[in-house]
């Protein structure tokens, strides 16, 4: 996977994908409503800064209908199943409880209706227009966009 630091910015700009196709910002809410305020803040900020890009929130079946209705005011909702790690795969029992469901994020790979996906964690707040990310070669991990 390419790594692009700020020193590579000119290289990336000249290699932009000028026709990225259908693009979406994707985030996720699972297990409970703890991150609901973060999800809403992310969605509103993305809508303000990059209104031309679709916003998708993946939710698991344990998220309440009321919460889903709230999220749907800002995001397209995609119901996804849990992806669980086999017991014993994570050797530390304290980490196993925390990370056993973290692979659920990988459901974004099933969103095949999109040509490009930009993952945004629920605890990230974009501070400026992030639409330039759609032009980076895929897959890539932009870092320190300068």
Image (cartoon, grey):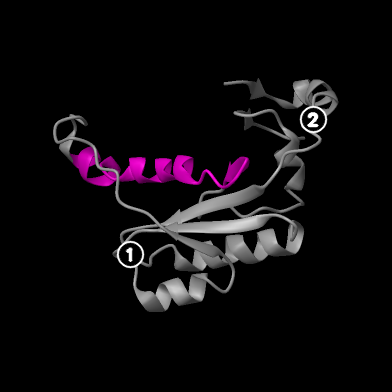
- Asked if residue 34 is among those painted magenta in the image, a careful observer would answer no
Residue ID at (59%, 28%): 139
Residue 41 as seen in the image, left or right of residue 70: right
Q: Position of residue 18 (x, y in %)?
A: 81, 35
Residue 101 versus residue 30 in the image, above or below: above
- The magenta segment is 94-119
- Where is residue 104, by image quadrant? top left
Residue depicted at 51% across the width and 49% down the height: 121
The disc label shown at residue 80, or none: none
Instruction: Identify residue for label 2.
Output: 16
The residue under label 1 is 32
Mark before the other along the chain sequence, 2 or 1: 2
Instruction: Tell me the element at label 1.
Output: loop
Other residues around mark 1 within 10 Å, as few (<14) / some (14–19) / many (≥20): some
Q: Secondary structure at mark 2?
A: loop
Q: Residue at x 62, y 20 (%)?
A: 2
79 vs 146, left or right, is left
Q: Position of residue 73 (x, y in %)?
A: 57, 74
Point out the residue furthest to the front here.
113
- 20 in relation to 11, above or below: below
**Pointers 2 and 1 in contact (C-beta within 8 Å):** no
């Amino acid at each position: 996977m390419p790594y692009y630091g700020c020193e590579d910015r000119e290289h990336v700009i000249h290699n932009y994908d000028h026709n990225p196709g259908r693009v979406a910002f994707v985030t996720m809410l699972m297990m409970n409503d703890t991150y609901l305020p973060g999800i809403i803040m992310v969605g509103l900020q993305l809508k303000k800064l990059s209104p031309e890009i679709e916003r998708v929130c993946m939710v698991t079946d344990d998220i309440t209908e009321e919460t889903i209705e709230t999220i749907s005011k800002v995001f397209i909702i995609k119901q996804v199943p849990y992806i669980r790690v086999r017991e014993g795969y994570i050797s530390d029992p304290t980490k196993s409880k925390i990370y056993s469901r973290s692979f659920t994020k990988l459901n974004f790979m099933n969103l095949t209706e999109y040509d490009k996906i930009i993952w945004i964690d629920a605890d990230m707040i974009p501070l400026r227009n992030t639409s330039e990310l759609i032009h980076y070669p895929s897959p890539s991990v932009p870092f320190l966009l300068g």
